[in-house]
Image (cartoon, rainbow, N blue to C red):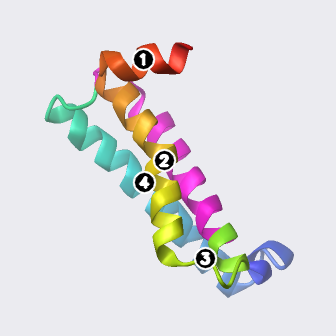
Amino acid sequence: MAISIQQPDTPLSKAYTELDQRLSAQMVRLIETLQARRLVGAAVSARAVGEVLFNNLNMMFIEFVKDEPQPLAVLKARVAEQHGPIARLISGERAAIASTAR
């Protein structure tokens, strides 16, 4: 990760950046698939939400890697805690919308 930031023109950095872009695109396709199945509202921007989810997950992973003693279970719990409300919002679940407005 550090090399990709410090030396963006290196082959390693370019490969790392491409991988991030592919993973982000995969999240966008996931949201699009959920929209096709009518599990995510049609008004939701699949690109925007997919990219936000990827960016957040990526940052959480970076923090996980930096915090060596953090158990994987803690990372998974944090992902569920942060992404759960977003999932409920984009699915149109009224309870999530009401609790988020408070």
| In front: label 4 or label 2 | 2
Magenta span? 41-62
User: Mark 1 packing: few (<14 Cα in 10 Å), some, or many (20+)?
Assistant: some
For the residue labelled by badge 3, is the local secondary structure a helix, a strand or a loop?
helix
Q: Amino acid at mark 3?
A: Tyr
Residue 14's label in the rendered image is none
Residue that badge 3 annotates: 16
Q: Which numbered disc, 2 or 1, marks the residue that appears first in the sequence? A: 2
Q: Height in image: 97 above or below 38? A: above
- The residue beneath circle 1 is 97
Instruction: Mark 3 vs mark 2: give the one in front.
Output: 2
Residue wearing tag 4? 25
Amino acid at dot 1: Ile
* Res. 9 image quadrant: bottom right
**On screen, 79 above or below 62?**
above
With respect to residue 101, does 59 lie above or below? below
Instruction: Compare residues 24 and 56 and report the one nearer the observer.
Output: 56
